[in-house]
């Protein structure tokens, strides 16, 4: 009797359909319940949420699920299905919604969903989706020798490009070539982890389009080129990380078998680029993110873009990419939507459940600023919370806290000014320490998912932290603190 392998397509289709449908319901519910408040005209909660220790439980549960379910034998395979990940995320989100109804009444749900889904999640996921799909149409073919010199050069190029095409764009553009180059090697995990450190996070420090928190700062009045002034700190962090990686990879390179070395040398091919038209579309995404803001007049005009015009323009470039890029290029890239669906499934719940922890943080503002007013304190506080709350909203909270502390040289921004020393600390903390966990920045999860699709066994949530990010990154951040922030 012939056994036919189950077709995975219906499951993927159902996953995507469920996610899209529930987002639509959440948006409609947010608008309907928000009533006459208007789009994004929410009033942030400034008092401590009642029974806040209960309200943060859903957020802790979703973090616990991400950390533990992939490790347990009974749930390991179950967790690999994006539909199951999404159900867990929505179950935790429902817990947060229930808490809000219990403590503040149903009228609080509209503003909360409006802020979490419409103001934060939708722009976040559309930007990631756009860069993910477009960069998936660029195929860097070839296979270089996976030597420490070549791998270090890959990481250096990625760290530089991340500020100019975004951490998502640089990550999606370079992760597959570096995986292909290292396909003959046994020791690869450390390369992917350092790739997340540098290309998906630290590299995006120099421009607002490099990393989401800096983009939010730009929207709040920080000059577009201001972050270029952070280049000395960026250069020191990147140089130290590249040196550490080179020594690390050189040691593991010598541990590779003679067969791996021989196979690596005989299978070398020069690098070639296909689908280069997509670089134009990436430039369009960058221009859209930089210049289209519904809260500001379009440059050279007195016209305000309508809500979500920026996101619609981005999706237009995605459509152009899909129509103009040959299917064979995406096939050669092993391109699938699995990684971005995974990010969407998990972060849909994270953005909702983290509203209570963020409200607790905002309500503690006076207490925080009374005991914390030094750059190094803002660096470590912003960075630590960016590791678990996603770095973009954490940046905004500390940005607003810093505005209440006029001290030293100030930078004029929307609705006031912010101490430059504190803004430097907040910017560095949110960008650098987004690398501390898989959920600190959106590209982290996508790189992990793509590596796993290629058969690489990536470390677990806790394994990533305790084996890699804490022992490698924390000493670098301590040195950065003493050199630049004391």
Image: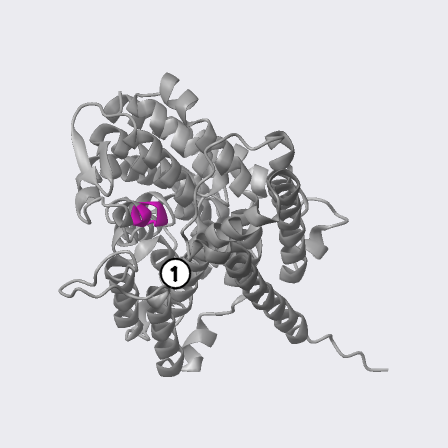
Range shown magenta: 211-216
Q: For the view shown, which residue lies furthest in the left direction? A: 300
Residue 365 seen anywhere in this rendered image of the structure: yes
From the viewer's perspective, tell me whether residue 1 is left or right of residue 230.
Answer: right
Q: For the view shown, which residue lies furthest in the front direction? A: 36
Q: For the view shown, which residue lies furthest in the right direction? A: 1
For disc 1, the neighbor class at 10 Å (few under 14, some 14 to 19, many from 20) is many
Element under disc 1: helix
Residue at the image point whose x is 35% and y is 78% from the top: 320
Measured as percent of width and height from the top left, residue 368 is found at: 41, 23
From the viewer's perspective, tell me whether residue 22 is left or right of residue 380.
Answer: right
Examine the image and state in which quarter residue 161 appears: bottom left
From the viewer's perspective, tell me whether residue 404 is left or right of residue 384.
Answer: left
Residue 304, placed above or below residue 407: below
User: What residue is pinned by disc 1?
Assistant: 127
Q: Quadrant of the N terminus?
A: bottom right
Dominant secondary structure of the magenta stretch? helix
Measured as percent of width and height from the top left, residue 468 is found at: 48, 36
Magenta run includes residue 212:
yes
Q: Quadrant of the C terminus?
A: top left
Residue 206, placed above or below residue 6: above
Residue at the image point whose x is 31% and y is 68% from the top: 270
Residue 186 seen anywhere in this rendered image of the structure: no
Magenta run includes residue 255:
no
Measured as percent of width and height from the top left, residue 195 is found at: 40, 48
Measured as percent of width and height from the top left, residue 75 is found at: 73, 50
From the viewer's perspective, tell me whether residue 392 is left or right of residue 229.
Answer: right
Residue 224, placed above or below residue 384: below
């Amino acid at each position: 009797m012939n056994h036919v392998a189950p077709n995975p397509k219906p499951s993927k289709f159902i996953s995507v359909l469920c996610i899209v449908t529930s987002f639509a319901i959440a948006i409609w519910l947010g608008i309907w319940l928000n009533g006459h408040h208007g789009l994004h005209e929410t009033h942030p909660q400034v008092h401590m949420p009642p029974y806040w220790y209960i309200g943060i439980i859903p957020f802790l549960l979703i973090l616990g699920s991400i950390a533990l379910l992939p490790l347990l034998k009974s749930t390991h395979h179950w967790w690999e299905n994006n539909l199951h990940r999404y159900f867990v995320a929505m179950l935790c989100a429902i817990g947060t919604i229930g808490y809000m109804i219990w403590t503040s009444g149903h009228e609080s749900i509209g503003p909360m969903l409006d802020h979490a889904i419409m103001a934060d999640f939708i722009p976040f996921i559309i930007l990631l989706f756009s860069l993910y799909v477009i960069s998936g149409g660029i195929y860097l073919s070839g296979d270089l020798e996976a030597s420490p010199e070549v791998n270090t050069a890959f990481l250096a190029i990625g760290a530089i490009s991340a500020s100019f095409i975004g951490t998502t764009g640089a990550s999606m553009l370079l992760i597959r070539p570096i995986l292909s180059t290292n396909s003959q090697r046994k020791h690869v995990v450390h390369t992917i982890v350092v790739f997340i450190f540098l290309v998906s996070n630290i590299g995006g420090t120099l421009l607002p389009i490099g990393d989401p928190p800096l983009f939010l700062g730009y929207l709040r009045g920080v000059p577009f080129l201001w972050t270029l002034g952070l280049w000395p700190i960026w250069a020191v962090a990147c140089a130290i990380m590249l040196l550490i990686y080179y020594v690390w990879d050189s040691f593991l390179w010598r541990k590779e078998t003679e067969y791996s070395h021989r196979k690596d040398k005989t299978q070398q091919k020069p690098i070639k680029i296909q689908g280069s038209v997509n670089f134009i579309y990436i430039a369009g995404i960058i221009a859209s993110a930089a210049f289209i803001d519904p809260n500001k007049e379009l440059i050279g005009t007195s016209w305000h873009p309508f809500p979500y015009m920026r996101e619609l323009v981005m999706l237009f470039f995605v459509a152009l990419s899909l129509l103009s890029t040959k299917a064979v290029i995406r096939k050669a890239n092993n391109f699938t939507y699995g990684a971005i669906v995974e990010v969407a499934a998990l972060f849909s719940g994270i953005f909702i459940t983290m509203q209570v922890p963020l409200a607790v943080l905002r309500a503690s503002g006076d207490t925080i600023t009374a005991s914390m007013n030094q750059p190094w304190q803002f660096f470590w506080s912003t960075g630590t919370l960016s590791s678990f709350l996603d770095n973009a909203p954490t940046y905004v909270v500390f940005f607003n806290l810093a505005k209440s502390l006029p001290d030293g040289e100030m930078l004029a921004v929307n609705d006031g000014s912010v101490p430059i020393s504190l803004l430097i600390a907040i910017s560095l903390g949110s960008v650098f320490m987004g690398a501390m966990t898989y959920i600190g920045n959106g590209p982290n999860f996508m790189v992990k998912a793509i590596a796993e699709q290629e058969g690489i066994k990536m470390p677990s949530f806790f394994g990533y932290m305790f084996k890699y990010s804490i022992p490698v990154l924390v000493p670098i951040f301590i040195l950065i603190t003493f050199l630049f922030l004391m």
